[in-house]
Image (cartoon, rainbow, N blue to C red):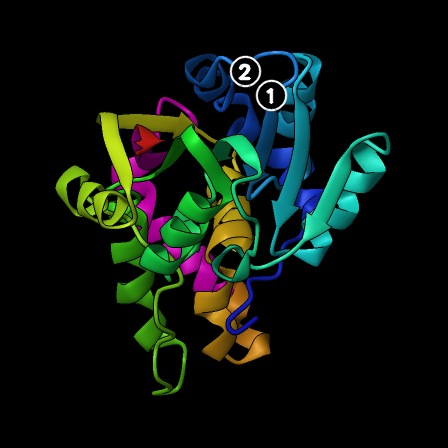
Amino acid sequence: MANRTSWDTELYEAKHDFVWKFGAGVIELLDPKPGERILDLGCGTGHLTAKLAHSGAEVLGLDASLEMIGQARQNFPALSFIAGDAAEMTFQSEFNAVFSNAALHWMTAAQRVIERIAQALRPGGRLVAELGGKGNIAHILNAVLRVLPHFNDGAEIPASRTYFPSIPEYGALLEAAGLELRTAFLFDRPTPLDGEDGMDNWLRQFTAYYFETVPRARRDEAIAATVEALRPQLWKDGQWSADYRRLRIVAVKC
């Protein structure tokens, strides 16, 4: 899979459990029922897959990251997980629902992924998802892009590996694939990070690929400079936060 993002699963589990904890609200929106077959798309380390299974649904977790899938299997050995690229899924009308939390914004071939989701759903099946929306982590990305040229010796800055759409933009993609958008919310959700080193850890987990063009000996320095650039906006009362904006949607296969 081209441009596959590598994940530090130990750091993810230890410092970034807010990713799946905030997903509890998306599960409530999905309202899974016993006996339903559900695909957890971008399942990460499997915590929400397990919550879905607890409802009595039959759940399959899929993620493009081999590291994440390995950790999910270790965390929940009784559940089913597979590694795969969402844009290459071949499921045919197999699922009552596709659930996704904090994952679709990593899938930059958005139209193809949505088409594969539509193909995977049974008629009347639903997609319930939350992803980064337009304006997500704007302060963080601006700081990264300001700092990098001072450290990467003139190398080309890597292209973004994320996609943060507006409601109309994502709605158009859904409808083109035969999914009717029923509800959509775009909202700010400033997200607390853990400890004095919270922003440093966040950058190393979620924007590591931007720093790949920085000579290895200077990467820590570049990340530290980015942290300091963000301090005026995102450090308050002894607490770091990430400037998240989330898009939460429900769509139904026509």
Q: Amino acid at mark 2?
A: Pro
**Residue stretch rendered in magenta on the structure:** 221-248
Which amino acid type is marked by label 1?
Glu
Residue at screen point 31% across, 33% down: 246
Q: Secondary structure at mark 2?
A: loop
Q: Which residue is mark 2?
A: 32
Q: Quadrant of residue 168?
A: top left
Q: Are marks 1 and 2 in contact (CB under 8 Å)?
A: yes
Q: Is residue 5 left or right of residue 133?
A: right
Query: Does the magenta-highlighted stretch encompass residue 228?
Result: yes
Classify mark 2: residues with Cα within 10 Å, few (<14), some (14-19) or many (20+): many
Q: Residue at x 34, y 87 (%)?
A: 154
x, y percentage for residue 59? 66, 29
Q: Is residue 103 above or below residue 194?
A: below
**Left or right for 248, reference 217:** left
Residue 236 at x, y percent in the picture: 33, 27
Which quarter of the rendering shows the C terminus?
A: top left
Quadrant of the rendered structure where residue 142 is?
A: bottom left
Q: Describe the element under mark 1 as helix, strand or loop.
A: loop
Quarter of the image where the N terminus is located: bottom right
Q: Which residue is mark 1?
A: 36
Q: CA distance from mark 1 to mark 2?
A: 7 Å
